[in-house]
Amino acid sequence: MEQTRLFVECEAAPDETLSERLEGADGLVIDPTTISTPEQLQRASTEVVLRCEWPDRYGAWQDRQEAVWATDCGLEENARLCDDYPVLSWLPRLEVYKTARRYHFSNVSDGEGFKFYVPDSATIHAYVVVEGERETNLHQALAKATRLGFTRLWLHSAEAEAEALGYDLDLLAQARAGFAGELWISGGATKIAHLENLAREGGAGVAIVSEGLLREYDSQTLQTALRPPVTEAPIEFAREVRIV
């Protein structure tokens, strides 16, 4: 099973305490407007993800080959950025929401002429991707991402983040079925158990957690939850039985 990497999203340049806790994480996600120079992150993980859409404003970062530029501008605009800045590494970040559940009258009555509202099965466990002012069906968005040549996507569930009950594993399962590339997932992880649940589900290339979770637990503890040690069961051989 693919091992999930751990990235931490910080609101600003990590202080000394947070920098120590970051050691052992696979990457750091940050807004470059909160950092004066890249040198502030020398103690951070080698892979840095910048939440930014206009690299010209942050020329110093363009020389950092390990930097990934994550944008919320939509798939087509992200593809244009790839063309305009081909030497930079781009990552589309997609806000994903559950569709509003719709109901309709059942065609079957209760025998006395009454009909009932029943849920529309097409809207149960369905998701939409918000691109600017447009909403796109999740599977259509995944197909578009594949067509545009993206090999990784960041899926963020705002609803899971608001509920704080763990990652949206149904979203991950649907996205995994419709996209062959690497999936990054965020939103909702507030406990160690949420990372353990994700590890059991599998299918995520990167799990993104908030700095709040890192301040509560260190990177090693979070990594252990994402990558539980594999225990090998001892092999026992049957004893030879002689029939006299």
Image (cartoon, rainbow, N blue to C red):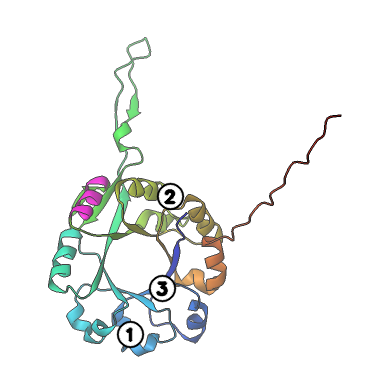
**Seen in the image, is 153 located left or right of residue 74?**
right
Mark 2–mark 1 CB contact (< 8 Å): no
- Residue to which mark 1 is pinned: 35
Which image quadrant: the C terminus? top right
* Real-space Cα separation, disc 2 to disc 1, in angstroms: 33 Å
Q: Picture coordinates of residue 219 (x, y %)? A: 52, 72
The answer to whether residue 102 is seen in the rendering is no
Residue furthest right in the image:
244
The residue under the point 51% across, 61% down is: 226
Q: Nearer the viewer, mark 3 or mark 1?
A: 3
* Relative side of 239 to 48, left or right: right
Q: Rounded to the nearest whole Å, what is the CA distance between mark 3 and mark 2?
A: 22 Å
Taking the magenta stretch, the answer to whether it contains residue 141 is: yes
Q: Which residue is mark 3?
A: 27
17, 24: nearer the viewer: 24
Specify the quadrant of the image occupied by residue 102.
top left
Q: Which residue is mark 2?
A: 169
Judging depth in this view, the residue of 3 and 79 nearest the camera is: 3
Amino acid found under the numbered disc labelled 3: Gly
Range of residues picked out in magenta? 139-147
Q: Where residue 155 sits: x, y (%)?
A: 33, 57
